[in-house]
Amino acid sequence: MSNAEATTSSDRTGTGRADVAPAYNPEAARLRALLEPSVQANRLYLEDVTIIPGSHRVVHVVVDLPQEETGGVNLDVIADISRVLSDVLDNDPDDDGRPYDLEVSSPGVGRPLTEERHWHRARGRMVKVNVVQGDNVTGRVKAVDDSGVTLVPEIAVKKGMKPKQGDPVTLPFDRIRNGKVEIEFSHLNEAGLEPEHNGPSEEA
């Protein structure tokens, strides 16, 4: 009934999805409610479910680690949860019988930081923050709490010199327009991630 594809990044264009709110899709909401218990049972967070219509519908599921964990969702975990969710969809009592393709991915490092849990997941990462009524800040996320984010700013220096760190700065959430992780290949390697990688496809 389905093909399941595992991939490590859902932000394929690099532009993110935060700028335009998607239209409400009742079928996507129904599938989210159907799939969420299985995602949580595998110690993951269900970030998003979208449906791309066509002769073969594409059910695109984005999963992430819980906010208290660091690092990324590796390909083995993506492959395992793909098989679990494919079984759930194949046994959906309210399914209308149309064929579908299942894609399961992680958000990837290019995801815009627009929610508190996104900032928790970015702890230890270098980020660029767009600030409301103030200078934008580039720095490493040191701590996150209910009120905001504490960064250690990186001060620009002459080319070829090692960047300097400034004093920690705390930005309340109401002063943060959005943020984005600055890609550092050493951190990608530590997390078991690659800048752009499509995982294996498998029959489900």
Image (cartoon, helix red, strand yellow):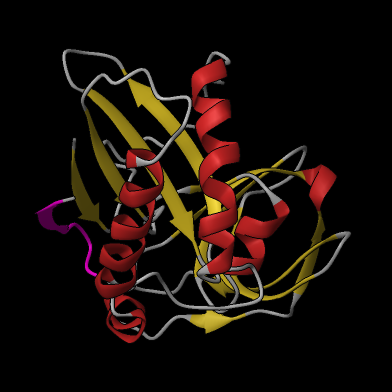
Residue 31 visible, this angle: yes
State the image coordinates of residue 177 (x, y, percent, origin top left). Answer: 68, 39
Residue 45 visible, this angle: no
Instruction: From the viewer's side, name the closer residue of 200 and 129.
Output: 200
Asked if the stretch drawn in magenta spans residue 201, the answer is: yes
Residue 179 sits above or below residue 71 on the image:
above
Q: Is residue 203 left or right of residue 164?
A: left
Marks counted in the figure total 0
State the image coordinates of residue 127 (x, y, percent, origin top left). Answer: 52, 62
On the image, which quarter does residue 159 sit in?
bottom left
State the image coordinates of residue 22 (x, y, percent, origin top left). Answer: 52, 19
Q: Residue at x 74, y 38 (%)?
A: 132
Q: Quadrant of the N terminus?
A: top left
Residues in magenta, as a range = 194-203
On the image, which quarter does residue 51 sit in?
top left
Q: Residue at x 39, y 59 (%)?
A: 109
Residue 108 sits above or below residue 164 on the image:
above
Q: Residue at x 48, y 25 (%)?
A: 94
The overriding secondary structure of the stretch rendered in magenta is strand
State the image coordinates of residue 79 (x, y, percent, origin top left). Answer: 25, 64
Residue 54 sits above or below residue 176 on the image:
above
Asked if the stretch drawn in magenta spans residue 179, the answer is: no
Q: Is residue 152 left or right of residue 21?
A: right
